[in-house]
Image: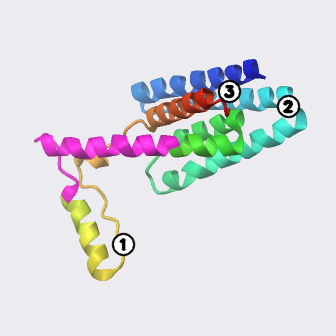
Amino acid sequence: MRHELHLISGLVLLLIWSAATWDLRQRRIPNVLVMAGAATGILLQWMLAGSGGFLATISGLAVGLGILLPGYLLGMTGAGDVKLMAAVGTFLGPYHVLLAALASIFVGGVIALGFAASALFSRNSISPWARYGLMVKTLVTTGRPIYAAPAEGEVMGRKFPFAVSIALGTTGFLAWQLWQGTL
């Protein structure tokens, strides 16, 4: 059983770090990589656990897809990121992919805060802090949240490769689970 967990973890790490490398270099994740990963996860789980594994892998795919889909619909992540998390779900199943996705979102938030903080020290980028202040002021005075889109050239208007956040968050989650002996 321990050998199978190491195999699954190793394949997940290979998938996410390959995707992160592609995303860093090309600002996209190839469909063939994500689809090969998902097919491998489905086949592996079916071979290891039979029909129960197949159901768990399809559930994991759905949860992985569903957790990042709102971010895609709001324009905060790319379609490749959503498909990558779904592929990770085929290996990890619904519960573990949910936790891995939450860890990835947390890492992405830390990276985004780093981007925002960098605007304080860079004369070449427009700071997002005035826009954030306007959104908070409007919420406090009217009780209604608003969204003000980033201005042209604003640091928060730039896209960063979210596959890196997925790779870091999922790697951290897997390391934690393996250390705890709960994966």
Measured as percent of width and height from the top left, residue 33 is found at 61, 26
Residue range highlighted in magenta: 103-129
Q: Is residue 23 magenta?
A: no
- In the rendered image of this protein, does residue 9 appear above or below residue 66? above
Look at the magenta stretch and give its main secondary structure.
Answer: helix
Q: Residues within 10 Å of mark 2 (few under 14, many from 20)?
A: few
Write the residue at 27% across / 68% down: 136
Q: Residue at x 53, y 40 (%)?
A: 81
Image quarter (top left, top right, bottom left or bottom right) of the C terminus = top right
Does residue 78 appear in the picture of this structure?
A: no
Label 2 sits on residue = 49
Q: Decide: marks 1, 3 in contact (CB < 8 A)?
A: no
Name the disc covering residue 36, or none. Answer: 3
Amino acid of disc 2:
Ala
The quarter of the image holding the N terminus is top right
Sequence-earlier tag: 1 or 3: 3
Distance (Cα) linking label 3 and label 2: 20 Å
- The quadrant holding residue 16 is top right
Relative horizontal placement of residue 59, taking residue 170 as reference (left or right): right
Rounded to the nearest angstrom, the CA distance separating label 1 from label 2 is 47 Å
The colour scheme used here is rainbow
Q: State left or right for residue 14 relative to residue 124.
A: right
Q: CA distance from mark 1 to mark 3?
A: 41 Å
Q: Amino acid at mark 1?
A: Pro
Residue 110 lies within the magenta run? yes
